[in-house]
Image: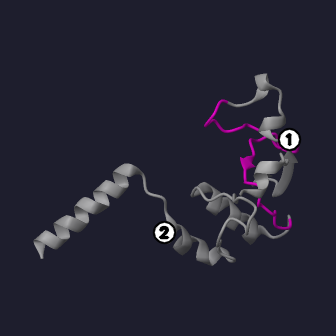
Amino acid sequence: MCRYAFHTYKEPFACFACRKSFKHQSRWDLPESERPAPGEGRVVRCPQCREPMAEMGLDFKAPPKTDVKQWEKVRALYAAGFAFDSCGDGGPGYRPEDLKDVADFIASNARLSDGEALLRKIAARASRGAG
């Protein structure tokens, strides 16, 4: 059972411009009138620069502000759809340690849309039939 199911935790958000992370009240603890609709993201602004922050997932641990390469790594992973979520039972899974490994990680773990998956199947069948 998911450890996070028994308690509401503050949710980590990151500002990539300021290289800072802040925890905000869980969406479930917000008044109903302020909760985003199911499937909608939450807009939380950075207290320093007022830009929208990224919702990182309950397992996110921010790198030090001075570690620019680690912040760039986290930004690249987030932009590719990799957050830091799990059920609290061992973390979000493997994430590359170094910025230089991010491109390969994203390429080998990319989530395909239904259309992209179908196109890959068609291409694979076509290459088998053409040989």
Colour mapping: one colour
The furthest residue to the top = 33
In the image, residue 110 above or below residue 36 = below
Horizontal and vertical percent for residue 86? 69, 60
Q: Can residue 12 be seen by looking at this rendering?
A: no
In the image, residue 80 above or below residue 90 = above
Distance of mark 2 from mark 1, alpha carbons? 34 Å
Residue 38 figure quarter: top right
In the image, residue 104 above or below residue 14 = below
Q: Which residue is mark 1?
A: 25
Horizontal and vertical percent for residue 94? 64, 73
Horizontal and vertical percent for residue 10? 85, 47
Going by the numbered disc 2, the residue's amino acid type is: Ala
Going by the numbered disc 1, the residue's amino acid type is: Gln
The furthest residue to the front = 1
- The stretch drawn in magenta includes residue 85: no
Q: Residues within 10 Å of mark 1 (few under 14, many from 20)?
A: few
Q: Which residues are magenta?
A: 37-64
Of circles 2 and 1, which is in front?
1
Residue placed most toward the observer, 107 or 115 = 115
Q: Report the magenta stretch's main SS.
A: loop
Q: Can residue 105 be seen by looking at this rendering?
A: yes
Q: Which residue is mark 2?
A: 107
Left or right: residue 95 versus residue 7 is: left
Lower sequence index among marks 2 and 1: 1
User: What residue is at 52 percent from the left and 74 percent from the top?
Assistant: 104
Horizontal and vertical percent for residue 92? 68, 65
Label 1 element class: loop
